[in-house]
Image (cartoon, rainbow, N blue to C red):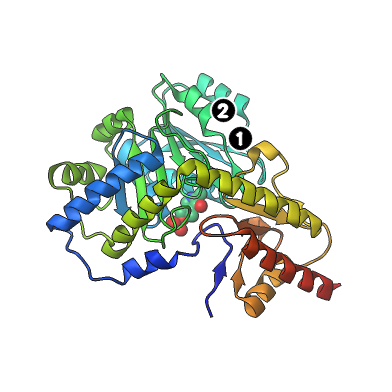
Amino acid sequence: MSKLLITPGPTNVPEEIREIMGMDLIHHRAEDFHNMIIRMGDSLKKIFETKHRVMTLTASGTGGMEAAVVNLFSTGDKVVVINVGNFGRRFVEICETYHLEVIELEYEWGTTYDLDQVKQVLAEEDDVKGLFVQYSETSTGVLNNLKELGKLTAGTETLLVADCISGMVVNEFKFDEWGIDCAIAGSQKGFLLPPGLAFIALSKRAEKAMYNSNLPKYYFDLKKAIRFLREKHETPFTPAIPIMIAAEKACNMLLEQGLEEIQAYHTDLRMYVEKRVKELGFKLFVKNPDARGNTLVTVTREDDVDLNKLKNDIDAKYDITLAGGQGDYAGKILRIGCLGKLTKADFDKLFSHMEEFLAEYK
Ligand SMILES: *Cc1c(COP(=O)(O)O)cnc(C)c1O
């Protein structure tokens, strides 16, 4: 029995992509791989909306986050981290692991950052080397406005580092236009792929910062990755070749469909989900409509329905997997993914099963 994943990643992978992963391997030091990586690099640029190089790392998304930290900063650098949930907290932890001086701006789960406060902190603190933020904060469903932050860091010494791992593809994203300095994406979120690859783009000034960074790194040394790409069209180490071949295909599929089309489709889908969950007696966890994105819909309830039980019952009986709450919100929220290959019909199925269990629990 196959599972329907209605989670904010990993997502269901289309059949044609899964077939490619079962095909014969190509060698990562051979000509056909070189050509593949060139084509894929071009596609990734289009998806990131950038003229800069986008690198592929064999790692889950967190590896991409760590790569951003260790490549762009130096011991003791002062950075500001916007923390609106679990993944914001992760940036704080990675920065602290490498002995950066972290100013953490923490906001209540379900809300976005306070622009005036960020503005004030950047104005008051001198020598802030980095501003870290999640695009989509997957633990709460909040979509942070990156464009406004890009306006704050433009023309300053502060690099804007955005974890766009779950935010990219289904939400509008413009690396160059918004003035992002480093963006990280992950294969298992919006890209129709399984986990295993992280994509990372650097602006010109981020690339400059990279050559001055003194933090320790080996596997994630992007200087090496850039040199290999430029000189040989290769990665420094053996990449996850089957996922890379699949990624080339997936990027093509996304670009053929068109990013605007995809984003419009997911906006419509997400709003449909929001409407249906309200009818089922759920409350939307993100109260501010401007802070909601297309990655997931996060819901809570005011009655005493055990949301973990609901999630487990639906999975056990109907093979539909949802995501529960993280941290303090375990059992208190449900995270309904709208990423990947999902249709209204998939959600209709989910909601009819929810209705059945909700009636049963009464
Ligand atoms: C999924 C995700 C990550 C990365 O998680 P991995 O398990 O390392 O792939 C990081 N940030 C956000 C916002 C995510 O949604």
At label 1, the amino acid type is: Tyr
The residue at the point 78 percent across, 68 percent down is: 355
Relative image position of residue 268 (x, y in whole percent)? 63, 47
Image quadrant containing the N terminus: bottom right
Q: Residues within 10 Å of mark 1 (few under 14, many from 20)?
A: many
Q: Is residue 328 above or below residue 361?
A: above
At label 2, the amino acid type is: Val
Local SS, label 2:
helix
Q: Is residue 320 above or below residue 329?
A: below
Q: Is 151 displayed left or right of 282 in the figure?
A: left
Q: Distance of mark 2 from mark 1, alpha carbons?
A: 8 Å
Local SS, label 1:
loop
Relative image position of residue 182 (x, y in whole percent)? 38, 37
Image quadrant containing the C terminus: bottom right
| Residue labelled with disc 2 | 118
| Residue labelled with disc 1 | 113
The residue at the point 28 percent across, 38 percent down is: 53
Q: Which one is in front, 354 or 299?
A: 354
Q: Look at the image and tell me whether residue 88 can be seen.
A: no
Which residue sits furthest right?
362
Q: Residues within 10 Å of mark 2 (few under 14, many from 20)?
A: some
The residue at the point 46 percent across, 29 percent down is: 178
Disc 2 + disc 1, Cβ < 8 Å: yes
Relative image position of residue 292 (x, y in whole percent)? 64, 43
Relative image position of residue 311 (x, y in whole percent)? 67, 69
The numbered disc on residue 255 is: none
Q: Is residue 8 above or below residue 174?
A: below
Q: Is 64 displayed left or right of 31 in the figure?
A: right
Mark nearer the N terminus (2 vs 1): 1
Q: Which one is in front, 250 or 70?
A: 250
Q: Is 102 displayed left or right of 290 in the figure?
A: left
